[in-house]
Image (cartoon, helix red, strand yellow):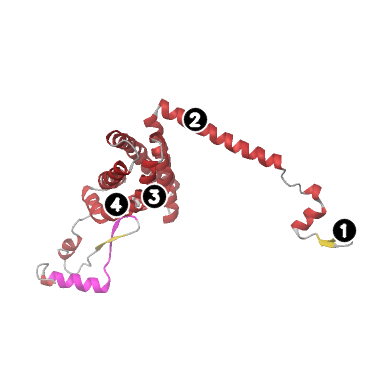
Amino acid sequence: DKLVLPEGSAISLSCPSCRRQAYPELHPRPSLQQASLCSYMLRASTHRLIVWYNARLTAAPYSTKAVGTGVTYTFSDLTAQAIEAEPRAVGERVERALKFGAVGGLWVGPLLTHWFNFMERMLPGASLRPLAIKLFVDQTVQGPLMIGSMFCWCALANGASLPAIRAKLDEELFSTWCASVWVWAPVQVLQQAVVPLQYRVAVSNLVSYFWDTYLSLQMMPAPAEAGAPVDPFPRQAATAAAPGAQPLLRRRSSTFLRDEPPTPSEAKLVKRRSILGPAEHK
């Protein structure tokens, strides 16, 4: 397994780099011309993609941005399902991903397009004052409305009842909006200051792949949990249960709300509340 070179040194043929040294004709290195050709083809492909995207933006700006947003949301939900690692049939996975993609393509994409156009008409320019106003309005008006409406559409698409939607909004809307401010405030500053208007939805889609994966984990309930109505007052319902029956307490899973048996300490608390009543419990 060794080869003696003409100058007297020996090399091991089990070493890949040594084999390349001994038999260079069998392991050719990419030439500079080949590397330049690959780089040129990559730049040409990118240029053609940008030209095609600009042509689509000119011919059909709203549908182009809506389709791009829908595709991003679909792949984000598939990523979220992979993170959840819950056993589901392929049909259920595809159905859930298409539902989330429909929310992105039919609601988020068109709404963001109109919103960016409106803000640019009302506050044109990229100086400090209009930039600060646009950032403040975007995070305090558009952000909560967008997130709240997405919670509603996702829950309705999965068969949740109105009480379930209300409970979901009460529990998770504010915390999700706070997280969105940390993510989207820097992005919107760069968007308003640097990115041309026609590309802002596309740039948002690039960032939102990761953000939408998080939103899918928050907004898309498991199919088995979506159809059951959620009691907005579970503890009151538990105290009214039949004597001897073990009450169920509402808990938040990784995706939605579910009823689970109480722990021993919680069972004692529920029993004490049923005896003393809510008004006397401290």
According to the image, label 3 marks what residue? 211
Report which quarter residue 47 is drawn in.
top right
Quadrant of the image containing the C terminus: bottom left
Tag 2 or tag 4, which sits nearer the N-term?
Answer: 2
Q: Which mark is residue 186?
A: none
Please give the residue where the numbered disc 1 appears in the rendered image.
5
Q: Earlier in the sequence, mark 1 or mark 2?
A: 1
Q: Which circle marks residue 177 in the picture?
A: 4
Query: Dot 3 lies on which element?
Result: helix
Q: Is residue 263 magenta?
A: yes
The residue tagged 2 is 52
Give the distance between the C-alpha atoms of the residues marked 1 and 2, in whole angstroms.
Answer: 56 Å
Ranked by sequence position, the earlier of labels 1 and 3 is: 1
- The answer to whether residue 204 is above or below residue 234 is above
Question: What residue range appears in magenta?
Answer: 255-274
Query: How many residues crowd around disc 1 within 10 Å: few (fewer than 14), some, or many (20 or more)?
Result: few
17 or 220, which lies in front?
A: 17
63 or 270, nearer to the observer = 63
Q: Quadrant of residue 18 in the image?
A: bottom right
- Whichever of labels 3 and 4 marks the residue nearer the N terminus, that label is 4
Q: CA distance from mark 4 to mark 2?
A: 35 Å
Q: Which tag, 3 or 2, sits closer to the chain's start?
A: 2
Q: Amino acid at mark 2?
A: Trp
Picture coordinates of residue 158, whole percent (x, y) = 31, 46
Q: CA distance from mark 3 to mark 2?
A: 27 Å
What's the distance in space between the residues labelled 1 and 4, CA to CA?
69 Å
Q: Earlier in the sequence, mark 1 or mark 4?
A: 1
